[in-house]
Image: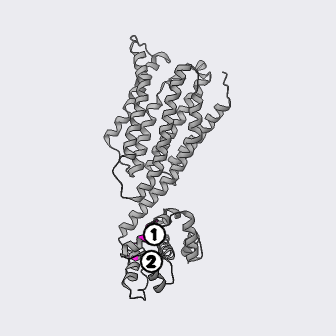
Amino acid sequence: MNIQVDFIDLIIIFGAMQGLFFALIIMSSKYFRTNTNILLGVSLIIIVLINAQTLLLKSSIYQVYPAMRLFEDIELVLLFPATLYLYYRASVSFDNRHHPYQLLLFAPFAISLVANLYVGGDVYFHWYTIHYKAWMPIFFTLEFYFSLVFNITLLIAEYFLIFRRKAIKNPLLEDNMKWVKVFYSFHVALTLTWITILTVEGISNQDFSYVIWIFINILFYWIGYKGILKFRLARNRYEIRQVVESKKQVTTQRTSQPDSENQYFTQMIRLFEDEHIYRNPNLSRADIAQRLHISEGYLSTLINEHSDKTIPEYLNYYRTEEVKKMLLDPDFDRYSLLAIGLEAGFNSKTAFYTAFKKETGTTPSAFKKQSLND
């Protein structure tokens, strides 16, 4: 058996190994494993199997073991869009429930699989003889064009799911949507590349499949990896908010009553301590002034006269206090430090760690470790 491996083949093999390893990590590690990420892991494994089909087709293995060609006949391109659709659906809503109608997404692949196994039993294994074979060319032609239509149809459905859905009030879901939109854009590019290559190959009678496999192996797994981290972070923040709301209590300790009798200054402190406006990472001086129904200039004067803190210092103080409270609460042990910091209102990892260390003199992880040892 002669198997020639060139540079392009090495890229495909490397990508397949990377994708398989990554998919197994997703589906086995408690750090990454969620129902949504499992759907992404399954999609990655399907891509790995499609890669394997490509490599085996280029080799002479089917000449030595003709029965193995049955693997090539399995139309995984009918399975991949179904699992990826479910991944999108779960990603945009954090809804992991399975509905009966979703089984219809797998009907085309199931029909194709049964038909190919039936034909393979005759052609490759000779278990029986199919006497009437006139339907086969028609079926497999329809199968090919249906796979194109099926992929495009689900892309359209995913577009409406992602871009034309009703507005989501939860900012955590909106944060996750940024990743989903990038991932979807790549998916569209991948599908269009696939269709273009099929068209060019049909006209030129040359093999350009390596283009799409380079495209997949260089970009898909990297974007998938970034997506898992981003989704896990968004999921952590979503669950943190649920825990906070379930406690139905103020997450920061009330400071002593302000010395000032100014009603606007007192109201500002209440906005921080009762309404937790600091949790908004984009909160500005103008937003606070608007809530108090005063001008920004008067707010600045107010702060200067009645406090030794600036607005940014107030925000960092209350955000840090909320983080400290969550770090000491066992109910938040399962969540990452970054998710806790972002949920408290910090807009980045750098801003979180810098402000926390300035307020406490130590890092979040060191603070938690020291508190547990005390």
Q: Could you tell me the amino acid type at mark 1?
A: Ser
Residue 180's place in the image compared with 102, above or below, is below
Q: Position of residue 119 (x, y in %)?
A: 44, 19
User: Disc 1 vs disc 2: which is toward the camera?
Assistant: 2
At horizontal 40% and vertical 82% (from top left) the residue drawn is: 265
Q: Are marks 1 and 2 in contact (CB under 8 Å)?
A: no
Q: Quadrant of residue 206?
A: top right
Quadrant where the C terminus is found in the figure = bottom right
Q: Is residue 232 visible?
A: yes
Which badge, 1 or 2, is on the more N-terminal residue? 1
> Which element type, helix, strand or loop, lies under badge 1?
loop
Q: CA distance from mark 1 to mark 2?
A: 13 Å
Quadrant where the N terminus is found in the figure = top right
Q: Quadrant of residue 101?
A: top left
Residue at the spot of label 1 = 284
Q: Could you tell me the amino acid type at mark 2?
A: Gly
Query: Which residues, given as a range, are shown in magenta?
Result: 273-286
Residue at the spot of label 2 = 297
Q: Position of residue 335 (x, y in %)?
A: 49, 62
At horizontal 38% and vertical 15% (from top left) the residue drawn is: 135
Q: Position of residue 235 (x, y in %)?
A: 45, 56
Q: Quadrant of residue 138?
A: top left
Is residue 369 rendered magenta in the image?
Answer: no
Is residue 281 rendered magenta in the image?
Answer: yes
Q: Nearer the viewer, residue 30 or 195?
A: 195
> Which element type, helix, strand or loop, lies under badge 2?
helix
Q: Nearer the viewer, residue 335 or 187?
A: 187
